Image (cartoon, helix red, strand yellow):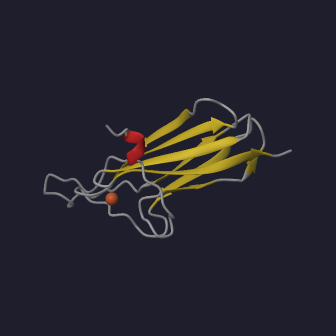
Amino acid sequence: MSKLTESIQSADWKAEKHVPVIECAAAVKAGEGFDVRITVGREIAHPNTVEHHIRWIDLYFQADGAKFPYQVGHFEFSAHGESAEGPNQGPVHALSQVTATVKVTKPGVLTALALCNIHGLWQSEKPVGISG
Ligand SMILES: [Fe+2]
């Protein structure tokens, strides 16, 4: 029996449209808020249709040396062109990107996990250091 974690994919985001890209400062001040932008389809756009879309992105933080990660946020994308007039006729689409404002007190690693409704789970990581 395989574990779900074995199905989580990762790749070079410049060549693979499903990979969540994490953008934030490489080092931040302890206890001070900073923005973390996460984008799926940054280089190659991912489809955003009723049939095929990014459903959500999760953000986690695990401090260096800590046993467990903590969930920072869950960002759900609910509009993909649904309409009473038919699929993909709707007037609104949620784009698969989000900016979270976060503060940390220790260095660690941010992990983004994104779900495509067809192509499964995709992960990427970015270390965050403490400056000053
Ligand atoms: Fe997909």
Q: Nearer the viewer, residue 13 or 76?
A: 13
Give the image quarter of residue 3: top left
Q: How many marks?
A: 0
Residue 112, x across and y down, in percent: 51, 47
Quadrant location of the C terminus?
Answer: top right
Quadrant (top left, top right, bottom left, bottom right) of the N terminus: top left
Question: Visible in this render: residue 56?
Answer: no
Q: Which quadrant of the frame does ligand 1 lie within?
A: bottom left
Above or below, 118 against 33 in this view is below
Q: Residue furthest right?
A: 132
Q: Is residue 75 left or right of residue 104?
A: left
Residue farthest to the left, as pictured? 85
Q: Residue furthest top?
A: 67
Question: Residue 42 at x, y = what percent?
Answer: 49, 65
Q: What is the x, y in percent for residue 102? A: 63, 40
Q: Position of residue 76 (x, y in %)?
A: 39, 43
**Image position of 56 with respect to 12: above or below:** above
Residue 71 appears anywhere in the view: yes
Residue at left offset 44%, top offset 63%: 41
User: Measured along the vertical axis of the image, is residue 6 above or below residue 48?
Assistant: above
Quadrant of residue 130 within the rendered picture: top right
Q: Nearer the viewer, residue 30 or 121?
A: 121
Q: In front here: 67 or 107? A: 67
